Each structure stands twice: as structure tokens, then as C-alpha cells.
Amino acid sequence: MLRRTFLQTSLAALATTALPAQAAPKPGEKLATAARTQLGITKTYDPHYTRLTYPNGDVPRSTGVCADVIIRAGRDALALDLQRLVHEDMQRDFAAYPQTWRLAHPDPSIDHRRVLNLETYFRRTRTELWHAAGSTRGNAFPGPLLPGDILSWRLDARLPHIGIVVANNLLSTRIVHNWGRGAEEASLLDLFPHRAIGHYRWPSA
């Protein structure tokens, strides 16, 4: 009887012992997951100017540009609004940002959706890990590349483009980006013909 009671008590204790807690997903892993949830949702590409609400403004999720992949991942995964963050930083130092569009002041409807502005913001917030010093192939980013890392290019050596790493293993580095067909997952090798520009880990570790 004593033995049976001991075994029952021991088994009950084992059954109620808490399993080791799984490590919480890292910010980059959350960003990668949020980027992948856009697949099949954002099906088109539309670069036209649209007046947005502020903050947390967005065009319909069925469309967008490459920068919208990053913006939506930040909001969905980490509740970080690049529209507000970029706008506030541009208000602090408008001259630090590219003057390509010859604007007289920040515009919260479009500034955060421009790759050149995102590159500048990431650089100013010290999340840039690498920047090309010359002509570098589009898949030749110095490693390591981690899920959630943000990469930028110049398509055909001139058109700014941005995407997010969602997986990296010995076989392939996978990214989610939108370069004309909506949000899609692709191999980093697909960007080989284009020029690699920057590697960012946002938010800063």
C-alpha cells in the first residue's frame, strides 16, 4: 500500500511539474513572421502617392510598395510605427535626409515609404550593420544574416529596393519583398544581378 501511494504521488508530481519555458521569439523572428503573413494578402504593387492618416496610416493591404513590407512587419510584430518614427526624425533634422524629391518639409504620407529615407533613418538610429563601399552583387551581403534583418539594393544599379530576411540556412537565404507582383518570398540569389547597398538590424539589439 505504501509503495502504491508513493508511486501515485510521484507520478502526480511529475505530471504537474512545469515544462521548461520556451524562449520568447526574438524581435527579428517576430518581424520575419509578420513579413510572411503578408504573402497572399498583398497581391499587387502600386507606387502612386496616397494621402494617409497619421500615425499608423496605410494604403489597402492588398497593394503597396517594397517599403510597405517593412512598415507593416514593424507594426504587426513590434508595434513600431515607421511612419511616425521617420516623420519625427525628419522633423528633427530634415536636411539629413535625401532631397531627391525637392520637398520643403516632411510629408508623413510618403516619406516612410521611400527606401532612401528608410536607409537614412536606419543609419541615423545605428541599426546599419553594413553599407556597400562599391559595386557589390545583390546576394553578397557580409554575414551573418538573421531572420528579421532588412536588406536594400539598387535594382539595375539605380532603383532603390528593400526586403526582409525571413530564413537563413545552409541551403538558402529567403527574403520577403515586393518588386512588382505583391509580397512574395524568394531566394536571395534572385537579387544576384542587382547591387547590394545596406544591411540593417532594426530595432537595435
Image (cartoon, rainbow, N blue to C red):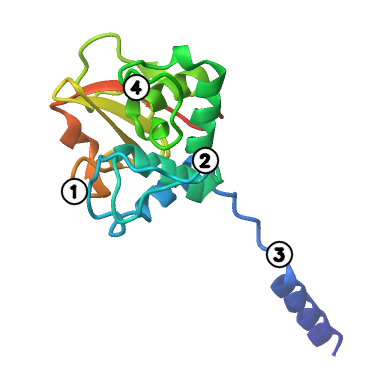
| Residue at numbered disc 1 | 181
How far is mark 3 from mark 2, CA to CA? 37 Å
Label 3 amino acid? Ala
The residue positioned 54% from the left and 48% from the top of the image is: 25
Residue 114 placement: quadrant? top left
Marks 4 and 2: which is nearer the front?
2
162 relative to 106 in the view: left or right: left
Q: Secondary structure at mark 3?
A: loop
Classify residue 158 by image quadrant. Answer: top left
SS class, disc 2: loop
How far apart are the two marked residues, 1 and 3, measured between alpha carbons?
Answer: 47 Å
Tag 4: residue type? Gly
- Tag 2: residue type? Asp
Location of the N terminus by quadrant is bottom right
Identify the residue position indicated by label 4 in the image.
198
The secondary structure type at the circle numbered 4 is strand
Residue lying at 30% horizontally and 17% vertically, measured from the top left: 100
Identify the residue position indicated by label 2 in the image: 81
Q: Residue 128: where, in percent of width, then height? A: 44, 21
Contact between labelled residues 3 and 1, with CB atoms less than 8 Å apart: no
Whole-percent x, y for residue 204 in the image:
54, 28
Q: Earlier in the sequence, mark 3 or mark 2?
A: 3
Labels 3 and 2 touching (C-beta < 8 A): no
Cβ–Cβ under 8 Å for marks 4 and 1: no
Q: Callout 1, which amino acid?
A: Arg
Alpha carbon distance from label 3 to label 4: 44 Å
Which of the marked residues, 4 or 2, is nearer the chain's N terminus? 2
Precedes in sequence: disc 4 or disc 1: 1
Q: What secondary structure is marked by label 1?
A: loop
The residue beneath circle 3 is 18
